[in-house]
């Protein structure tokens, strides 16, 4: 009898445990399922490689480059390819305008031939496109630029839909007839701290560099900060390519340092190729103005309390009418 | 007696001559004597002038060098003065970069103040270039390009920049611990750069706004596009957004919202606009679209449009499937002509440089 009672209890516990496990499993499955559903499916996706074509060319020669386009979707993807010229500003932002004649100056587009301008990439497959650059024998040496765009074509949408489309660019940077090793002619237009006096760290600087060469170069900038009291610290800024005749601007924040020496010097060095660099020095001032003002106020109050306490007591008496 | 004295004198003279010859056999110290030595044809032990003295070194073995693929055994005074030849540097491309490689040199148990020079080549050192003090590649090895182990990044290493894409590079190191102590080049380490790539996707190619009527205040702000980007480009990427025209139905249009990309605003009045969740966006104050709630701008109609998503430069670890959401809002006026308004929103992604 007791055995049967124990059996019943064990069965009850087993049933309860099973129900709990089932709940736990279903919760886990549901939770996982919900998470999976949250990720939005991608309707259009391509990968291009190389995305930047930084090339050195010689007049009168023909060059061939292969660009690989991957269709990452499980459906075939029709793609259009076309060259466009561009201009840039100090921030490196592009402007594309087919009607603006000033874009014609350094464009590589006239020398480029793409073997297929319209093609279909099968699902989850790749397409290798050959870009041929045929240069005339006489061409001014220098830098020539362009963007090769790949635009996935969108299937015809419903009658009332607006359409969202995309295009992906391959940046082409070509130096034609430029001898190696190349040392760019550049100059630092401005190098200045963002504040006249730095109240607290970190310090930040703005500098602009102009490329006076006929072709582009990659400017690698370093800021060296030192004083007569400590060894200089060197901070590396991001590298930027400067197109010929163009100016690029940097806004650099130097990480927090321990030293708050009032007068320090800062040197900007910008690499111009083959181990050469250009530089500019400035003096920077560090002074904790806020801290100084608070300290002066507190000291003045202490001074007043100590040396003018009779006047304060007299004034207080007058205020409360006992004077 | 005279003859005996002469004989004794001759014996003394001969013994003196013999001992004199014996002393001049080679350099000697109290304990040692170099019995056989020489400087070869045309060379002399020492050359002196009123200002200078030139002495040969005895004991230097020429052509005594023994080498294998991994080791070099040498002898002599000059060799013992040389710095230890640094072992092969570790060269890698951890971030699948296209224009830079990471290197960690081995100081080869040289003293702390030893300096090291690094050579780099794409053709197994048929043509040799040198890593410059700013970590770019140059044709000349200058004095400033000899740097200490610490300056070359010690155990963390540093990156050589400005390399060609999809190219195999070999690098080797030599050491210097004072004058006349330059070691031979050590064994090589190698790695390859890859091609820069850019992947871009959008989550939907259709944009269907709700029916705008008085019950929803002629407004729909529930639609969005997710932009997904991957790249290993050092300077990152930028996505521009634009429309081919305002939302248009026949001759009627819902104008683009008045806020601009450089100065977006909290939504007011009517129009078709967008906001982005990129809180570090180029083209103005970085968080202008997100600070203090969603701010809206109207789309531009000119190419390439305005920045709606980006990733700034300095990318060492490739960006993988980075997502930003552009959310749309359309609010029509109550007097807008009824109809099906359409446009095309175009997103252009380009590598920054």
Image: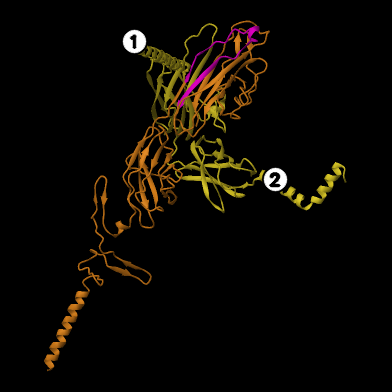
B65 to B99, vertically: above or below: below
Crowding near the residue tagged with mark 1, few <14, some 14–19, many ≥20 C-alpha atoms within 10 Å: few
Residue A292 on image: x %, y %: 68, 47
Q: Quadrant of residue B307?
A: top right
Q: CA distance from mark 1 to mark 2?
A: 91 Å
1 and 2 marks in contact (CB < 8 Å): no
In the rendering, what colour is chain B?
orange
Q: Closer to the camera, A188 or B206?
A: B206
Q: Which residue is mark 1?
A: A1
In the rendering, what colour is chain A?
yellow
Magenta span contains residue B223:
yes
Q: Chain of mark 2?
A: A
Residue B4 shown left or right of residue A151 in the figure: left
Q: Secondary structure at mark 2?
A: helix
Q: Secondary structure at mark 1?
A: loop
B140 to B271, vertically: above or below: below
Residue B224 on image: x %, y %: 54, 16
Residue B84 on image: x %, y %: 33, 52
A35 to A229, vertically: above or below: above
Whether residue A294 is visible, yes or no, is: yes
Residue A265 shown left or right of residue A46 in the figure: right
Q: Which residue is mark 2?
A: A293
Image quarter in which the N terminus of chain B is found: bottom left
Q: How is the image coloured?
A: by chain
Residue A44 on image: x %, y %: 46, 16
Whether residue B168 is visible, yes or no, is: no
Q: Which residues are magenta?
A: B201-230
Q: For the point 59% across and 25% down, which residue is it? A: B290
Q: Chain of mark 1?
A: A
Magenta span contains residue B211:
yes
Mark drawn on residue A34 = none
């Amino acid at each position: 009898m007791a055995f049967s009672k124990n059996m019943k209890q064990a069965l009850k516990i087993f049933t309860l445990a099973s129900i709990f496990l089932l709940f736990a499993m279903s919760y886990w499955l549901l939770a996982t399922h919900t998470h999976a559903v949250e990720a939005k499916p991608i309707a259009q996706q391509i990968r291009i490689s190389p995305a930047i074509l930084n090339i050195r060319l010689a007049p009168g020669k023909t060059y061939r480059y292969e660009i690989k386009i991957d269709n990452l979707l499980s459906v075939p993807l029709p793609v259009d390819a076309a060259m466009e010229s561009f201009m840039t500003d100090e921030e490196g932002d592009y402007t594309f305008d087919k009607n603006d004649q000033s874009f014609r100056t350094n464009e590589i587009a006239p020398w480029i031939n793409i073997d297929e301008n319209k093609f279909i990439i099968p699902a989850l497959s790749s397409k290798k496109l050959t870009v041929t650059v045929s240069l005339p024998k006489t061409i001014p040496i220098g830098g020539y630029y362009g963007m090769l765009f790949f635009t996935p074509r969108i299937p015809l949408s419903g009658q009332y839909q607006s359409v969202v489309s995309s295009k992906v660019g391959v940046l082409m940077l070509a130096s034609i007839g430029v001898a190696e090793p190349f040392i760019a002619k550049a100059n630092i237009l401005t190098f200045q701290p963002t504040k006249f006096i730095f109240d607290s760290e970190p310090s930040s600087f703005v500098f602009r560099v102009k490329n006076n060469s006929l072709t582009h170069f990659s400017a690698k900038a370093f800021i060296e900060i030192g004083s007569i009291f400590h060894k200089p610290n060197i901070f590396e800024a991001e590298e930027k390519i400067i197109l010929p005749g163009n100016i690029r601007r940097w806004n650099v924040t130097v990480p927090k340092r321990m030293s708050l020496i009032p007068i320090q010097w800062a040197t900007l060095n910008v690499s111009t190729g083959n181990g050469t660099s250009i530089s500019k020095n400035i003096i920077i001032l560090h002074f904790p103005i806020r801290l100084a003002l608070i300290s002066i106020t507190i000291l003045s109050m202490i001074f007043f309390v100590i040396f003018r306490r009779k006047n304060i007591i007299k004034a207080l008496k007058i205020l409360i009418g006992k004077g | 007696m005279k003859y005996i004295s002469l004989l004794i004198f001759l014996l003394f003279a001969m013994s003196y001559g013999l001992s004199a010859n014996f002393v001049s056999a080679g350099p000697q110290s109290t304990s040692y004597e170099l019995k056989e030595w020489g400087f070869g044809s045309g060379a002399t032990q020492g050359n002196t002038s009123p200002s200078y003295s030139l002495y040969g070194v005895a004991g230097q073995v020429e052509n005594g060098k023994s080498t294998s693929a991994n080791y070099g055994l040498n002898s002599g005074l000059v060799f013992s003065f040389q710095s230890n030849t640094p072992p092969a540097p570790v060269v890698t491309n951890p971030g699948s970069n296209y224009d830079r490689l990471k290197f960690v040199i081995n100081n080869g148990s040289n003293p702390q103040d030893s300096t090291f020079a690094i050579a780099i080549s794409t053709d197994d050192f048929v043509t040799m270039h040198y890593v410059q003090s700013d970590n770019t590649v140059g044709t000349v090895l200058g004095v400033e390009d000899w740097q200490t182990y610490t300056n070359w990044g010690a155990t963390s290493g540093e990156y050589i920049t400005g390399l060609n894409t999809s190219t195999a590079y070999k690098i080797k190191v030599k050491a210097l611990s004072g004058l006349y102590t330059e070691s031979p080049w050590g064994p090589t380490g190698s790695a390859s750069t890859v091609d820069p790539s850019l992947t871009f996707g959008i989550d939907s190619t259709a944009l269907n706004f709700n029916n705008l009527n008085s019950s929803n205040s002629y407004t729909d702000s529930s639609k969005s596009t997710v932009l997904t980007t991957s790249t290993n480009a050092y300077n990152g990427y930028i996505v521009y957004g634009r429309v081919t025209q305002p939302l248009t139905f026949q001759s009627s249009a819902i104008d683009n919202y008045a806020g601009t990309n450089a100065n977006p605003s909290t939504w007011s009045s009517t129009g078709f606009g967008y906001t982005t969740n990129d809180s570090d966006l180029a083209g103005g104050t970085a968080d202008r679209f997100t600070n203090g709630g969603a701010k809206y701008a109207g789309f531009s109609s000119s190419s390439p449009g305005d920045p709606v998503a980006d990733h700034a430069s300095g990318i060492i670890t490739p960006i993988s499937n980075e997502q930003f959401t552009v959310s749309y809002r359309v609010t029509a006026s109550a007097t807008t002509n009824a109809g099906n308004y359409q446009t095309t929103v175009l997103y252009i992604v380009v590598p920054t440089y």
